[in-house]
Image: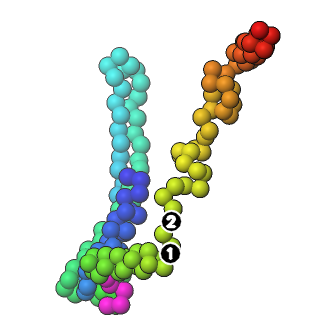
Amino acid sequence: MGLAIAKTVAVAEIIRRRVRGVYQQVEVGSQEIVDEWEPNEENSELPKQTTNRTVTSITITLSKSPLNRSHPGYHEPLPESQVKSFEEEREQIINKIEAEEETQPQQQTQSKRGGRGRRGGRGKGRRGRGGNRRGGKREAKKQEDEIEEVHEA
């Protein structure tokens, strides 16, 4: 089951904060479950195994009409100041983003790394930063020998 109870509570709270005048009643309970395993036909000499486990549950009743006030899990509707419809919240977020855009200067299109991509590399070869594309000491030695031959000629 995992986080089922936490998700149920979160959904109920979201609904209460989006819909005006919602009454809530919460009930927490548990149920004993008995699991039984019988051995395969091949291993018939093994005994039957039984385990007991307790599963916790929650029931949240949401209603626009009043519920039983004497119930231990009864909650009154939230005050009007704490309830915002989806449209109101969306409008508030859009206004906030627009205000931030007006106060912040325009950012440069290039990143601080000078257009080197996500990792800021410099065209690395096999053996480190930049330099010989093929990499390796053998290739570098060949290039040095070729340069000396050109200078000698």
Give the dominant element type of the magenta stretch: helix, strand or loop. helix
Q: Nearer the viewer, residue 73 or 64?
A: 64
Classed neighbour count for the residue bearing mark 1: other residues with Cα under 10 Å, few (<14), some (14–19), many (≥20): few
- Report helix, strand or loop for mark 1: loop
Residue 32 appears in the picture as rendered: yes
- Image quarter of residue 20: bottom left
Query: Pointer 2: what residue?
Result: 107
Q: Nearer the viewer, residue 24 or 69?
A: 24
Q: Nearer the viewer, residue 78 or 106?
A: 106
The magenta segment is 80-84
- Report helix, strand or loop for mark 2: loop
- Cβ–Cβ under 8 Å for marks 1 and 2: yes
Query: Pointer 1: what residue?
Result: 104
- Image quarter of residue 23: bottom left
What residue sits 35% from the left and 46% below the top? 34
Indicate whether 40 appears above or below 29: above
Q: CA distance from mark 1 to mark 2?
A: 8 Å
